Image (spheres, grey):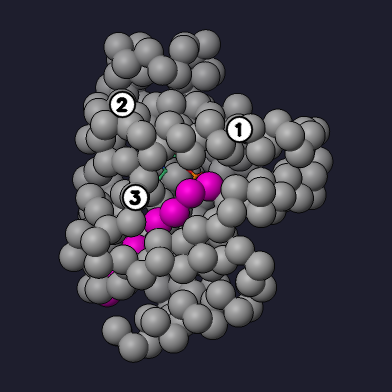
Amino acid sequence: MINIAIDGPAGAGKSTIAKSLAHSLGYIYVDTGALYRAVGLNALRFGYDTKDEKLVTSTLSKIKVELKFINGVQKIYLNNEDVSEDIRTPQASMAASNVSAIASVREYLFDLQQNIADKNNCIMDGRDIGTVVLPNAQVKIFLTASVEERANRRYKELMEKNIEIDYNSVLEEMEQRDFQDSNREIAPLKPADDAIIVDTTNKSLPQVINDIKNIVEERV
Ligand code: DC
């Protein structure tokens, strides 16, 4: 199976780029952040502190997290409920980052991700795909952009979804999340040694997609 790993900080354009590439290659696109978001949302619904290792771990034996691919589009199910929209709030973003630092959560989601990659040609995006989940991926891309540009993109996305928030809160949240994700002990956000680093600051989306397509074509 052909596996392509795309890692990078929040708002670097991973999902848009991975979706477009997956579409043109006929691969499935796997957004692994959605898994952490589902675990975080579940803990939030219990009213738990999402940094509390014991409490969050206690939720894992009682949940069912599933990815389903409907006409190539990924949907995420939490206990048989489609939570694909509910996981996109700023609260769910921070909860995802918090629970993702917990070892039991990463272990719980690890097999699920590897099983999908074993059975499908796929493009998987996340933080530790090239380093931990798919160390043998044929192509590894690390996408990045300045934090201001990433916050600006995320702000526009949230506005389009009518989620009320101001730009400065988006920027602050993004800085905090990047810091947590890059400095945690297990599987921190960082480029794999053999990843190609692509900086998307000041580049248009079609330009970046084209650059990455060229990289993929050279290798696959
Ligand atoms: O990609 P995203 O913004 O939806 O991810 C939400 C959080 O999940 C992110 O802040 C860190 C965590 N995450 C992770 O630790 N490992 C991954 N492979 C994907 C996401």
Note whether ligand 1 is within 8 Å of mark 1.
no
Q: Quadrant of the C terminus?
A: bottom left
Q: Residue 185 falls in which quadrant of the image?
A: top left
Magenta span has 3?
yes
Image position of 178 (left or right of 116):
right
**Residue 219 sits above or below residue 162 on the image:** below
Contact between labelled residues 2 and 1, with CB atoms less than 8 Å apart: no
Neighbor class of circle 1 (other Cα within 10 Å; few <14, some 14-19, many 20+) is: some
Q: Amino acid at mark 2?
A: Ile
Of residues 189 and 220, the one nearer the viewer is 189
Q: Secondary structure at mark 2?
A: loop
Q: Secondary structure at mark 1?
A: helix
Q: Which residues are magenta?
A: 2-10
Which x, y percent locates residue 152? 71, 50
Q: Amino acid at mark 1?
A: Glu
Q: Amino acid at mark 3?
A: Lys
Q: Which mark is residue 173?
A: 1
**Residue 173 sits above or below residue 45 on the image:** below
Residue underneath mark 2: 102
Which x, y percent locates residue 218? 34, 88
